[in-house]
Image (cartoon, coloured by chain):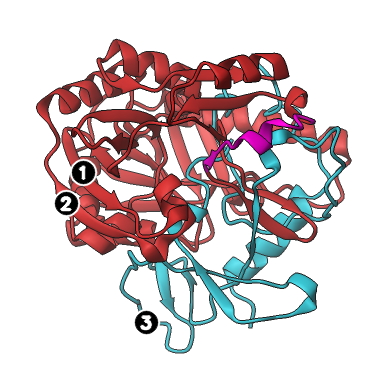
Amino acid sequence: MTVLVLAQELDRTADGVVEGLIRRGVPVFRLDTSYFPQRLTVEAELSGGRWSGRLVTEHREVDLEAVRAIWVRTPATFILPEGMSIAERDYARREGKLGLGGVLLSLPALWVNRPDLAATAAYKPLQLTTANRCRLATARTLISNSPPALRRFVHTAGTNGTVIKPLGTTLIYEDNTFKMGWTHRLAPDDLADLAGFDVTCHQVQDWADKAHECRVVVVGDRMFAVAIHAGSPESYVDWRADHNSLSYEVIELPSQVQHGIRAFMAELGLIYGAFDFVVGPDGGFTFLECNPGGQFGFLEGISGLPITETLVALLATGGNR
Amino acid sequence: MATLGDNQRQHRMVAVGGEPATFADDPLVSVSGQFSLGCLDTAPPHASEAPSGPATRPFGLRWVRDVGLPTVPSFFRYCPQQQTAVDVARGEPIPPSMALEWTTQSHLDGDEGPSKDYGWETVPDFLP
């Protein structure tokens, strides 16, 4: 059996998984999809109801039928030959995606995670309703591009007020630099001018009373929970805004939260997920989001939790999806 | 000597810049369009624009902060034989890192300034 690791080259969290698999004697084929088509050849033939053939790079190749597990870390988009027209590139990118992606998706392998399921799970509105069905508490939420709807929502909020947070990532590139945004507590002054609220969807939620936050990394049947304590005003609103002020504590999750997380994972078909919760002064957990591709390296480095080893063990066992 | 990572990064800048992502832009298909392919190494796109203006700039972007440009690591490179990072000078494997190590440099006002370290979480968890 071979484990296919779909990751970019300079990814040292992925290095840990690759090395763990090699230590176990499990064959690994690490691949960045950006290799296709210039540095990766795919040969796939349908026979007897399944695809056979191989993936070939300059340095190694893998038999498609030997692939038993696929870890989707962060593969990058195809790098097409220069000189193609925009129309040609669009066509080539689409055909490559449907061809290479389709062959890989058809393999009877354990996916961590299956990309289509991870992509669907990335929708926050879907996450929130799924969390509710799984008995995980959520904050009252508005998604809108209507300024009057925002004003109504804010005016009916409790004394804790509201926050605005992106539905995806806020990483943008402008002014020749990368910019990023985190959760922001809306102040009355913010509502004086709502220009730009109407140009796209915005997610606004009631502020969940917070003692600290908690990240839960789920790998198969295992859960790793770490309380994240803020040490600055910025990290109290969103811990990602000020890493240097944080302190961490490995915790046990309440059984109800564990059950909710397992149900959430099952409903969305996820094998791996990184959950974020607010933990209130009363110990209650409020679900914020689940990131199907969330980072875990920093958490392992800080806490010593054996997340990599757990992932390695899961991939090494393979299995049918 | 350029590493494979460097070459890849240079190619990607060409590949990403200015091209319409029509397939992934389908507004109702799940974000990946079946098979997620991102550009997570945060290589700068080909071109940069300034913010458009108050009427058209999304409200949610009012609170973004400059996080600088990621620097290419100088002491390790990817080794396609070992499939992990190796020391640039000796070619020997280096231990995997679980630390916060995405280093960026602020370049506002042309000031190279001191390096700033940003954690893994500043790298987007999941890009369409």
Of the numbered discs 1 and 2, the one sitting upstream in the chain is 1
Q: In the rendered image, which quarter is residue A159 located in?
A: top left
- Judging by the rendered image, the residue that carries numbered circle 3 is B92
Q: Residue at x 33, y 68 (%)?
A: B96
Secondary structure of the residue carrying numbered label 1: strand
Tell which subunit mark 1 falls on: A
Task: Check disc 2: other Cα within 10 Å, few if <14, some if 14-19, many if 20+.
Answer: some
Task: Check disc 1: other Cα within 10 Å, few if <14, some if 14-19, many if 20+.
Answer: many
Q: Residue at x 66, y 71 (%)?
A: B106
Disc 3 + disc 2, Cβ < 8 Å: no
Q: Residue at x 59, y 47 (%)?
A: A181
Disc 1 + disc 2, Cβ < 8 Å: yes
How much space separates mark 1 and mark 3, taking CA atoms? 34 Å
Tell which subunit mark 3 falls on: B
- Judging by the rendered image, the residue that carries numbered circle 2 is A250
Q: Is residue A304 magenta?
A: no
Residue A222 is situated, as x and y percent measured from the top left of the image, at 16, 38
Q: Is residue A190 magenta?
A: yes
Q: Amino acid at mark 2?
A: Val
Q: Is residue A157 above or below residue A243?
A: above
Q: Nearer the viewer, residue A76 or A171?
A: A171
Tell which chain the image draws in red: A
Tell which chain the image draws in cyan: B
Q: Amino acid at mark 3?
A: Glu
* Magenta segment: A183-195
Looking at the image, is mark 1 or mark 3 nearer the viewer?
1
Q: Nearer the viewer, residue A75 or A102?
A: A75
Secondary structure of the residue carrying numbered label 2: strand
Residue A70 is situated, as x and y percent measured from the top left of the image, at 36, 39
Q: Amino acid at mark 1?
A: Ala
Task: Check disc 3: other Cα within 10 Å, few if <14, some if 14-19, many if 20+.
Answer: few
- Judging by the rendered image, the residue that carries numbered circle 1 is A225
